């Protein structure tokens, strides 16, 4: 019996559960706020699903800008001598 594969699975499980619980909490809060603001359950569900999608797209472009900034910062400066 090998323990290596089962140990690696068990060691990531708490992190995965924490991520899942945070996702559920985030969606629940977004849905509750959406319902309080709109009074519509359909609109609340739509907003709670739409917001993370837009956030993920915005994060993608945010990372691109930061990566580009890091590349230009790391390039050696030309001397004017």
Image: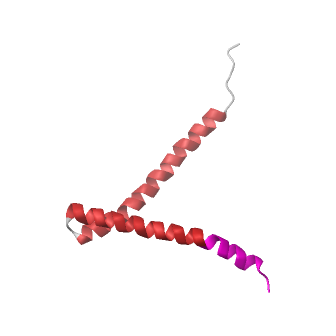
Is residue 68 found left or right of 44 in the rendered image? right
Nearer-the-camera pick, 16 or 51 = 16
Is residue 47 found left or right of 8 in the rendered image? left
Estimate the x, y position of residue 46 in percent, counting from the top left.
31, 67
Nearer-the-camera pick, 42 or 68 = 42
Rendered view: 1 above or below 18 = below
Outermost bottom residue: 1
Query: In percent of the image, x 47 and y 66: which residue is there?
Result: 22
Nearer-the-camera pick, 47 or 25 = 25
Residue 60 falls inside the magenta stretch? no
Tell me where residue 74 sits by quadrant. top right
Which portion, as a residue range, is magenta? Answer: 1-13
Query: In percent of the image, x 41 and y 67: which residue is there?
Result: 25
Rendered view: 57 above or below 8 = above
Q: Quadrant of the C terminus?
A: top right
Q: Quadrant of the N terminus?
A: bottom right
Considering the whole magenta stretch, tell me its main secondary structure: helix
Tell me where residue 47 sits by quadrant. bottom left
Estimate the x, y position of residue 3 in percent, counting from the top left.
76, 80
Outermost left residue: 39
């Amino acid at each position: 019996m090998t323990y290596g594969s089962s140990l690696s699975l068990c060691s990531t499980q708490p992190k995965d559960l924490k991520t899942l619980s945070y996702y559920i909490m985030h969606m629940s809060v977004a849905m509750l706020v959406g319902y309080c603001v709109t009074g519509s359950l359909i609109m609340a569900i739509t907003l709670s699903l739409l917001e993370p999608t837009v956030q993920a797209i915005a994060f993608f472009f945010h990372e691109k800008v930061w990566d580009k900034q890091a590349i230009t910062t790391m390039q050696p400066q030309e001397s004017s001598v």
